[in-house]
Structure formats: structure tokens, C-alpha cells
Amino acid sequence: MGILHGVGIVESLWVALDTLRAHKLRSFLTMLGVIFGVMAVVVMVALIEGARVSVVQEFEKLGSDVIIVAFDPSERVRREQRGGTVEGLKLSDLYAIRELPELRVVAAERSLGEKELVFQGEKVRASLIGVSEDYLLVRALEVERGRFFEPYEVEQGEKLLVLGYETARKLFGQRDPIGQTVLMDGTQALVVGVLQKRGRGFGENLDEGAYIPLYAALRRWAGDETLSMILAMPRTREQTPRAMDAIWETLMRLHNNQPDFRVDTLESILQAITRVIALFGVLLGSIAGLALLVGGIGIMNIMLVSVTERTREIGLRKAVGAQKWHILVQFLIEAAALATIGGLIGMALGWGVGELIEWATKQTDAFGDNGLTFHFPLWAAVGAFLFSASVGVVFGLYPAWRAANLDPIVALRYE
């Protein structure tokens, strides 16, 4: 009995495919809704997944155990209402945090905005940042040529300069920058190092920066002791929560319990960003899925028309012994084949569109060096395939049931 059923299914499959080949244009037009629906889903899922993968890779470069300490300006209004006087992170905060036994590395930075760098008539604008000697470690940066600042040079506020990769290239071209003197915002500074190329990430491009010793930035340029950020690394990853608590308690002790700061880890920031990306993925995927729904309705509509057109054929097949399930399977296979073939075409087109988007965005700096990354994982491909096939089965079920339940005598008399 199982063999007979198998033969019936194979026969129904061939009949269904022959019917689709006999009406190529109608079949193609029926598939269009599924094609565009699957294509939209593929592009949306792949771009969202690409964004997630890119963010994770960026954070992995920096290390998830890096603790970021920053002044929170959103507390300003509440602070004024409380009568607080905290104005930001200070050098005293840096000294106190460095004393904490839970931390192995503590670095600080002070952003000074864009400044003009001049060398033998060449002018380049770069983000000037004052940094401490451990800055490379917490930022996961490396020196390509020359060296970074020594601790005593940072303490004494020496007029030294380390250039980002792009800044060095624009200012010096093929010449060696090491040992050259650059006029920076009216002050001469000696170039001692060039950083390796890093690329754009999180809205900033470290390659286009220029770095000076922290105390030079505070004494010679800023004229105060305010820090933009403190970056710390715990002795072990497991100590991260305890280290964060120790930093917070230190800040509260130094600032009269005014909670005007943020103490966070890259890992928690990563989790927050990935949650937002996932939410956007669900939203955009749902919108794209509406196109698949429209495609399924189109399949049901065409299959109902097909049942009406082939009423006599159905009656004839029943008259020569075809059972209800033969007819049901035949029409279900037709609907599933339409949706599955349309899904495969949609996946191929979606892949092509995604690659085109990635290539086009790489040609502009608006989305970074890597553009909008297109990442279409295997699970998404399998899911899109099964979903498109299920659309055909679900929306083909009623037409198939209607065809299977036609009275053979009435069907044979149908004109």
C-alpha cells in the first residue's frame, strides 16, 4: 500500500510540474509576489545580521572587559535641581581609580576637537586627543612606526605627537614622519610614532586622529584638569562587576554622592546595541513578510482559477480511479512548487541585491570602510526556503481541498 501511495505522489508531482510548464507566463506572474517577498526578507535579514556581526567584531577588537567611565551630561538638569556642583571627570578621579586593587590598567583621554596640523606647506585637520601611556592597550591599538609615549613624557607634558594612519598619510605622503616637527595649532610638536590602520568604528575614525601626552593636552591646550573619559581593565574578566562597583563607590566618595557619571562595560553596551538591532530586524522582517503574504494570496487566487479551468480534467481523473488524496496532493504540489521556485529565485535575487548594496556602500565613507555588511547565514537561507514552501502549502490548501471534493459526475458535465 505504501508503494502505491509513493507511486501516486510521484505521478501527482509530474502532473503538477507539467501543468506549470504548460502555463509558463501565468506561473511566473503567480510567483512574482513570492519572489519579491522572499527577496525583501533576504535583504532585510542579511543587512540586519551583517550589522550585528560587524558590531560584535568591533567590540571583540576592543575587548569586552574594558570599563568605560564618563561624565553623564544628561544628569545636568537633575544635578542643578539637587544643587550639585560636579562638572566632569578630573585628574583626581584618575589618580583615585588607579589606586584600586581590582584594576590592572587605567588610561584616560581628553578630546580637544579638530586642530590644524601643518608640515612644509601641507595642512591637515585632525581630531586632537590627549592620552595617557596605557591608551594603546585599552583601545587595542598598535604602533606601526616609531613608538608611543613613555610615562615620564606624559607626566611632563612633552610636546610630542603620535599620528593616526590616515593623518600621517595625508600630511607626509611617502615620507617618513618619525622625527619630523609639525606645527599644531600654533605649537611645534615632534612626531614620535604612527599607529597601525584601524578603520572606522562606532562613529569615529581613529586613523584620522592625532595623539599628544595627556598632561600636555590639559596644561597647554585645555587649561583645566577635566577628562573626557577614563578607560580601565580589571585584573580578570570575572572581577569586572566588582571593579565597576569599586569605581562607582570611589566616584561617589569624591563627588559627594552626586550620581553624575556612567560606569559601563563594552559587553553591556554590546548587549544593548544587539537588542536594538534585533528589534529592528523583527520590525523590518515583519514588513518584508507582508509581501510574502500578498504572494500567498496570489497563489491561492490563481489555484482557485486553475481548479475552475480544470474541472473536467479532475472529473476524468476521478472517473478512472483517482482518489481524493491524489487530487489533493497534485494541487498542493503545484502550489508548493510555485512558492518554492519563487522562493529560490527570490533568494538568488536577494543575495545579488545585498552584494550590490555592500559594494555600493563601500564606495562612500558614509558607512565606514566596510560599507553595509551583507551577511546571510545558512539558517536564514533554510528558513526562507521552508517559509516560502509553507506559504504555497497553506494558501494552496483550500483550492486543493475544493478540487479534491468535486463530484466526478458534475465535473464531467462541466463546460
Image: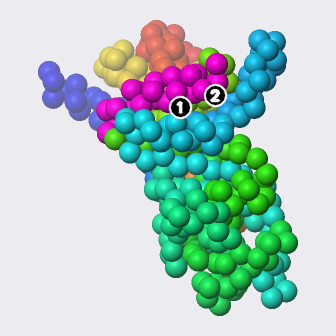
In this view of the protein, can residue 285 be seen by the observer? no
Q: Which residues are magenta?
A: 236-256
**Residue 130: image location, x then y, percent:** 66, 57
State the residue at coordinates (78%, 58%): 221
Residue 197 screen position, x and y as percent:
56, 69
Residue to which mark 2 is pinned? 261
Label 2 to label 1: alpha-carbon separation: 10 Å
Q: Secondary structure at mark 1?
A: strand
Return the residue at label 1.
264
33 in the magenta segment: no
Does 171 sit left or right of 64 as displayed? right
Q: Is residue 339 above or below residue 125?
A: above
Q: Which residue corresponds to the image point at 53% horizontal and 31% vertical from the top-left?
A: 264
Left or right of 320 in this view: 88: right
The quarter of the rendered structure image containing the N terminus is top left
Q: Please say if 353 is above or below 11.
A: below
